[in-house]
Amino acid sequence: MNTFKDLFLNELADMYDAEQRIIKALPKMIKAATCNHLKKAFQAHLKETEGQVRKLDLVFKSFGVKAKGKTCEATKGLLEEADEIATDFKASPAINAALICAAQKVEHYEIASYGCLHEWAGVLGNKDAAGFLLGILDEEKAANESLTALARSRSNPEALGETEQIGSDSGAADGRSVNLRRGIRPVAATRSRTGSSSR
Ligand code: ZN
Ligand code: FE
Ligand code: FE
Ligand code: FE
């Protein structure tokens, strides 16, 4: 009979595989992004993701088992969709919005998975594992939030074709995007937090 611990280790192996797929996919998404801010955000999360694999190694170790991955069909599918949308919107002003949406689907999957894993590690009485998993969970939530912020301040207005990144991609000091038609910050940036994300 499969135990609760088996369930935990099964899900852990799933995420171990997922993170390694994400490490392979992010360089392609960095290349596909045309906004330097988004490239940097993806770059930062790539570094973080490499650290997450090391944290997962420690979680396996804390349970006294060898680290191993098990194909995560969900992440595989989400990354295939990311690839597809990046191809379809390659030359479009909506490319960065498309990439953010694809990336946020992955973050939400990770948030759900690490939410369970963190909870389960606690129930199974492994405090070290619970700590590592909470650390990863917080990183995924923060990554998701920063993508929402980028979408609101830049990629969505850019996709709408109403804004221009004033020197932002060549490193201007303030780097805000400005609505050319009305001369104000995009409306989307001031909308309620419930708009394009959840946590
Ligand atoms: Zn930019
Ligand atoms: Fe991750
Ligand atoms: Fe999975
Ligand atoms: Fe992530």
Image (cartoon, rainbow, N blue to C red):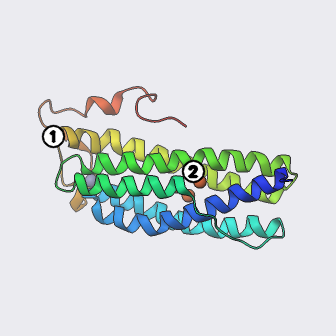
Farthest-out residue, front: 1
- Provide the residue designation for mark 2: 110
Nearer to us of marks 1 and 2 is: 2
- Provide the residue designation for mark 1: 161
Q: Is residue 177 left or right of residue 64?
A: left
Quarter of the picture holding the C terminus: top right
**Foreground pick, 3 / 122:** 3
How crowded is the residue under tag 1: few (<14 C-alpha within 10 Å), some, or many (20+)? some
Residue type pointed to by label 1: Gly
* Mark 1 vs ligand 1: CB below 8 Å: no
* Mark 2 vs ligand 4: CB below 8 Å: yes
Q: Position of residue 74 (x, y in %)?
A: 52, 52
Residue type pointed to by label 2: Glu
Residue at 54% x, 67% y: name it: 20
Image height of 21 relative to 99, above or below: below
Q: Is residue 107 left or right of residue 133?
A: left
Residue 19: quarter of image? bottom right
Residue 65: quarter of image? bottom right
Image height of 165 relative to 43, above or below: above
Label 1 and label 2: CA atoms lie apart by 32 Å
Q: Is residue 61 visible?
A: yes
Residue at 33% x, 33% y: name it: 189
Q: Please tell me whether mark 1 sits on a helix, a strand or a loop.
A: loop
Residue at 68% x, 70% y: name it: 68
